[in-house]
Amino acid sequence: MTNNWETIIGLEVHAQLSTESKIFCGCSTRFGDEPNSNTCPVCLGLPGALPVLNWRAVELGARAALALGLHIQERSIFARKNYFYPDLPKGYQISQYDRPFSANGILEIMTAERDEAGHARDWRPLTVRITRLHLEEDAGKNVHEGLPDVDRFSYVDLNRAGTPLAEIVTEPDFRSSWEAYDYVNHVRRALQWVGASEADMEKGNLRCEANVSVRQRGETAFGTKVELKNLNSVRFMQRAIEFEVERHIKTLESGGRLTQETRLWDERAGETRVMRSKEEAHDYRYFPEPDLPPLVVTNEFIDKVSKSLPELPDARRKRFSEQYGLSFADASQLTAERTLADYYESAVEASGGNARATANWIRSELLRELENAGLTAEKSPIPAVELGALVRMIGEGKISGKQGKDVLVEMFATGKSAGAIVEERGLVQVSDTGEIDRIIDEIIAANPNQLGQYRSGKEALFGFFVGQIMKASKGKANPKIVNERLKEKLIPPQ
Ligand code: ADP
Ligand code: ZN
Ligand code: MG
């Protein structure tokens, strides 16, 4: 009975904080430099080298915590997490353990299940308990070349070693893969929004591990959990969880047993594979880092960071709904990124306050063009004020909506203003009723047969007249006015 199973998920997110230099030394965090060029005795783990905390990492960690509504502890302690790995030259990672930067937080997100086509419906709030957010250093990178067992070479690049990370761990509070999906997107957007992290999973500066188990509904004890890694996008994570849940249920229903282990998602094969079992798990022998003092943050510091934060995404989404009359889905889409939200508000202003129409033009036309070109709103070839100007022209009836679509495509391709394109193409729509009446009268006079048929009941001929009038006006007559005037004139005088 598959529907008697309940899914339990807990998430661990590592976000690279966007500092220019590493967390305990002055080396650059730049990506893509010559391997091992951004290193020094501290991040190489040479004997006697001492770490010095980069305060910018604390500031960005604080921005991340506050963007998620978390409380920052006045005093936290760095600790050594001991394990051996070639990309960890010290033999330990400086992290935080029993006194993390932030603990026991509560986060409210919005979530929805998705239908077959991937459309979200019935958005609802979900409360997630955040176990902790702590600061730590990243390890380096092992690079392997050649096939396993044949000509295999392994290299170590320590440029990444010592890059600051915020690790965010949740309680096992998610009950479906889509809840997990919405959570990671929420975190990603929040961190990007406040500039704490680029939070791009494809670039690896946001990494996510999903812990998954199932249990019979009504059961209070948790089942055996599996940790999923190698999740390179939020969608991959969602698929990996789905696969894993199904595997757990199948195994248990056929009388099998699950092992606590770490598994890797293989997107191409669409399945997870064992990486290591928990029997090989490390005992990290955490102890307080003797080379660093406790991290103490004052209320003044937190106040200062708080005040420097922009309006946060959820607050802005709520304001968009209230101030601009947008639906939840529309407001969500327009606050998916801060640059898009900024773009929208500038465009609304330039449109003369036409908030709904601006939202529609961005959502249906501009975002499609941006997506095709692989661009974000920030890089849009159509500046926000120009999009607003286009919406205004359409609102004022200067050009039709249909013409507007063509103009937008040309604006996007050429970077020209709406006004310039409309002028060049001679598009200006005729809304002058006197002018339109004159054309209508001409067309009616020139088609007495059709007029007779229409008046004796052949109403389909209305379209014929509209077509003739639009043709005579070279497509410039305002169709709404043509319809109104034509209706009046075709009715026989009583
Ligand atoms: P570990 O020591 O294996 O890392 P933790 O207890 O620290 O395990 O939990 C790590 C993550 O796994 C947390 O996000 C937690 O919420 C989640 N988790 C713990 N137990 C379960 C379970 N039975 N099912 C799903 N997730 C779980
Ligand atoms: Zn260094
Ligand atoms: Mg873990």
Image (cartoon, rainbow, N blue to C red):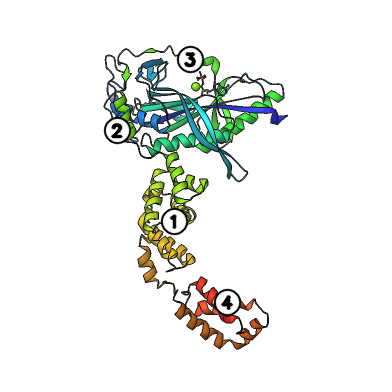
Residue type pointed to by label 4: Lys
Residue that carries the numbered disc 4 in the rendered image: 487
Give 231 or 69, whichever is nearer the viewer.
69
Q: CA distance from mark 3 to mark 1?
A: 55 Å
Residue at the image point whose x is 43% and y is 32% from the top: 68
Residue at the image point whose x is 46% and y is 43% from the top: 318
Q: Position of residue 208 (x, y in %)?
A: 48, 30
User: Which badge, 4 or 3, comes first in the chain's sequence?
Assistant: 3
Q: Nearer the observer, disc 3 or disc 1? A: 1
Give 403 or 308, whichever is nearer the viewer.
308
Residue that carries the numbered disc 2 in the rendered image: 20
Q: Are marks 4 and 1 in contact (CB under 8 Å)?
A: no
Could one spot residue 161 in this view of the protein?
yes
Q: Nearer the observer, disc 4 or disc 1? A: 4
Dividing the picture into quarters, in which one does residue 60 lie? top left
Q: Is residue 231 left or right of residue 27?
A: right
At mark 3, the secondary structure is: loop
Q: CA distance from mark 4 to mark 1?
A: 31 Å
User: Which badge, 2 or 3, comes first in the chain's sequence?
Assistant: 2
Residue that carries the numbered disc 1 in the rendered image: 358
At mark 1, the secondary structure is: helix
Q: CA distance from mark 2 to mark 3?
A: 32 Å
Q: Quadrant of the C terminus?
A: bottom right
- Would you call the spot at circle 3 few (<14 residues within 10 Å), some (14-19), or many (20 or more)? few
Residue that carries the numbered disc 3 in the rendered image: 282
* Residue 420 position (above or below residue 330): below
User: Which badge, 1 or 2, comes first in the chain's sequence?
Assistant: 2
User: Which badge, 2 or 4, comes first in the chain's sequence?
Assistant: 2
